[in-house]
Amino acid sequence: MRAMEWIDRLNRDGTLPDGALLELISARHGLSGTEREYLYLLARKKSTAVFGHDIYLRGLIEFTNHCRNNCRYCGIRRDNGALHRYRLTDAEILSCTDEGYALGLRTFVLQGGEDAYDTDGRICRIVSEIRKRHPDCAVTLSIGEKSRESYRRYFEAGAERYLLRHETADAGHYSYLHPEEMSMEHRMNCLYELKEIGFQIGAGFMVGSPGQTDACYVKDFRFLQELGPHMIGIGPFVPHHATPFADCAAGTLEDTLFFLALLRLYFPKALIPATTALGTIHPRGRELGVLAGANVIMPNLSPGAVRKDYLLYDGKICVDDEAGQCRDCIGSRMHSIGYRTVAARGDYPGFFGKPDGLPAGENPESETGKRCMVSEQQEEIN
Ligand code: 5AD
Ligand code: FES
C-alpha cells in the first residue's frame, strides 16, 4: 500500500510533497493495526533519539476563565452565560507555582481566556514574581492574541515561551470555527511576532473539529513548517454542551495518535504534549500519545475550587484532583510505559534565547546565554 511508502519516506526525509501527504492522510482509516503500530514506532524512535525516555512536565495554571472571545468550539466563550466566571488573584497564582515547584515542576504555564482585567501590568508583575521566586523555572504564557508591544513587555518581564494554537491553517475552516471578528491572518501574525521577539512558541490545532477536511490538515503541516514552532499542541476536538458545536462528534483517539506521529516525523525536536483532551477521550490517551511520539505532559496545578469552571470541553479529566495527585498520577503512568518524568525546564533543544540585539533562534555554536539543554543532568522525579 502506498501509505506505507509515504510513511517510510517521511521517516527518512522529514517531509513529504503536498500530494503524498494528502494521500497518506486520506488513507489513515484504512491502515491496519500493524501498520499503525509501525508508524507509532517510527515516531517514538525519532522522539527517543532526541529526548531519550524523559518526559517534560508543564504545570498548568488556569488563572482566569473570563474571555472576550466567542470561539464556537470553546466552553468558556463569551456567550456561555451559564458559566461561573473566576479569576485567580496574584497571591493564588503564586501559591500554585510554589506548590508546583515543591512537586518538581520547572515550567509553569499561565493559561487563561482573553480577559480584559489582565492588564500588561498584572501579567508582567506575576511573571517577574514567579521568575524571582523560582529563577530555575520557565514561564509560559497562553493568553491569546495581544499587540506586539504587549508581547514584548511580557518577554522583558521574563516570560520565555508562548502558546497560541493557530487552530487551523485553512481560511474557510477558520471562519467556520470562529466568530467574524477573529481572523486567521491576525492569529498567524501574532505567532510570527512572538517568534521574532524571541519567545519559544507553540502552535497547534484540534483533531476532528467540525468542518475539518483532510486538505485542512495538509495546510496545517505546511503552515507549521513555514512557522517553525518549538512546541506543537494537538488534541482531539471534544464537544462542549453550551456551544454551537454541542452535537458534533469528538475527534478520535486513532486520528489524534496518527497526527501526533506525523508531527513527530516532521518535527523531531519539537516539544509535543500528550494533551489533557487526549486523556479525556481515552483512559490511557496520554500514555498512548507518548508512545506515538509526544514528550510533554501538563499536569494541572489550578486550585481545586476553580477546576470545574475551566471547562473548554465536556468530560475533562482531573477536575476533582489536586495538584499533587495529578503529578503523582502522571509519574506513575509514564513509569508504566518505560518513561520517566524529569524536573527540568525542558527547553527546545539548542535554543539559546535572545542574545542582546540579535534575533533569537537556534545557534549550536554559541555558548553564551545558554539555557537548558536536553543533555544536562536531570533529576528523575517519577
Ligand atoms: N475541544 C478540544 N480542544 C479545545 N480547545 C478549545 N476548545 C476545545 C474543545 N471543545 C483547545 C483550543 C485552544 C486550546 C487552549 O484548547 O485548541 O487553543
Ligand atoms: Fe490528574 Fe491523573 S493527571 S489525576
Image (cartoon, helix red, strand yellow):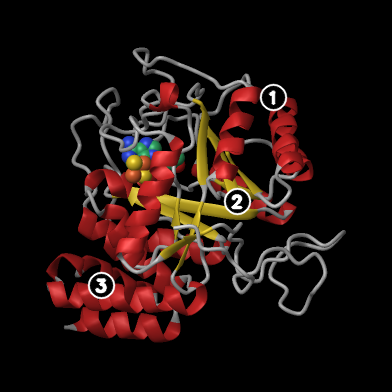
Mark 1 Cα within 10 Å, few/some/many (few <14, many 20+)? Answer: few
Q: Which of marks 2 and 1 is nearer the N terminus?
A: 2
Dot 2 surroundings within 10 Å: few (below 14), some, or many (20 or more)? many
Q: Where is residue 329 in the image (x, y as percent from the top left)?
A: 35, 48
Which residue position holds label 2? 106
Which tag, 1 or 3, sits closer to the chain's start? 3
Give the Cα separation between the discs numbered 3 and 2. 41 Å
SS for callout 3: helix
Residue for point 13% across, 72% down: 33
Q: Which of 62 and 116 is in front in this view?
A: 62
Q: Where is residue 182 in the image (x, y as percent from the top left)?
A: 50, 34
* Three-letter residue code for mark 2: Arg
Image location (x, y in percent) of residue 3: 23, 78
Q: Could you tell me which residue is drawn at 52 percent across and 58 percent down? A: 231
Examine the rendered structure and indicate whether residue 169 appears above or below residue 19: above
Dots 3, 2 in contact, CB < 8 A: no
The amino acid type found where label 3 is placed reads: Glu
User: Which residue in the structure is indicated by mark 3?
Assistant: 23
Q: What element carries label 2?
A: loop
Indicate which disc residue 158 carries. Answer: none
The answer to whether 86 appears left or right of 116 in the picture is left
Does mark 1's beta carbon lie closer than 8 Å to ligand 1?
A: no
Q: Which residue is drawn at 26% across and 72% down?
A: 24
Q: How many labels does the image show?
A: 3
> Nearer the observer, disc 2 or disc 1?
2
